C-alpha cells in the first residue's frame, strides 16, 4: 500500500513532464490540422455536375464540418487537460489520485498522462 502523503520523485516528475510536453506538441499539431480541414472550403469542383450530386456534396460537407468541429472541441479539451497535468507536475502534486490520495501507477500515467484518478478509483465509479 502506498503512503497517502507520498509523491513522485523529481526525477519521475521530470520524465512525466517530458511525456506531457511531447503530447501537447503532437495534440497541437493535430488540432491545427483539424482546424485547417474545418476552415477549408472542401470545394470538389461540383459546380458543373448534376444538382442531385451537388446536394449530396453539400450535405456531406456540412456533416464533415460538424464532425471536425466536434474533433476540434475534444482536442482542445485534451490539450487543456494536458496543460493542467503539467501544472500539477510543477507544483509536485502530479500522479496523486484525487479520490484515494494514493499514487497513480506509473504505467497508467505513461499511457494517460492527464489521468487524475487511479484504476482503483475509476472502478469505484462504475
Image (cartoon, rainbow, N blue to C red):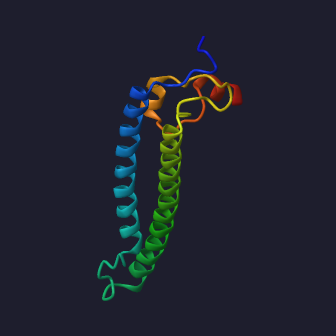
**Towards the viewer: 37 or 78:** 78
The residue sitting at 38% across, 45% down in the picture is 21
Q: Where is the C terminus found, in terms of image quarters?
A: top right
Q: Position of residue 71 (x, y in %)?
A: 48, 58
Percent across and percent down for residue 54 are 40, 81
Extreme residue toward the bottom, this view: 48
Q: Quadrant of residue 53?
A: bottom left
Q: Quadrant of the N terminus?
A: top right
Instruction: Examine the rendered structure and indicate whether residue 93 appears above or below residue 50.
Output: above
Does any portion of residue 126 appear in the rendered image?
no
Q: Is residue 38 above or below residue 5?
A: below
Q: Nearer the viewer, residue 120 or 86?
A: 86
Q: Is residue 56 above or below residue 14?
A: below
Residue 70, how many percent across, how many down? 52, 60
Residue 63 visible to an observer of this rendering: yes
Residue 7 horizontal side relative to residue 56, left or right: right
Taking the spot 47% from the left edge, 43% from the top edge, the residue there is 86
Q: Residue furthest top?
A: 1
For image coordinates 36% across by 69% down, the residue present is 36
Q: What is the number of callouts on the image?
A: 0
Amino acid at each position: 500500500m502506498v503512503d497517502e502523503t507520498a509523491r513522485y520523485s523529481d526525477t519521475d516528475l521530470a520524465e512525466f513532464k517530458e511525456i506531457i510536453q511531447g503530447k501537447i506538441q503532437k495534440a497541437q499539431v493535430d488540432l491545427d490540422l483539424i482546424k485547417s480541414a474545418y476552415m477549408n472550403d472542401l470545394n470538389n469542383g461540383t459546380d458543373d455536375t448534376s444538382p442531385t450530386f451537388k446536394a449530396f456534396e453539400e450535405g456531406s460537407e456540412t456533416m464533415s464540418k460538424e464532425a471536425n468541429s466536434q474533433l476540434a472541441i475534444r482536442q482542445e479539451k485534451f490539450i487543456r487537460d494536458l496543460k493542467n497535468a503539467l501544472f500539477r507536475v510543477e507544483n509536485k502534486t502530479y500522479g496523486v489520485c484525487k479520490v484515494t490520495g494514493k499514487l497513480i501507477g506509473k504505467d497508467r500515467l505513461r499511457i494517460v498522462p492527464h489521468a487524475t484518478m487511479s484504476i482503483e478509483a475509476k472502478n469505484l465509479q462504475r
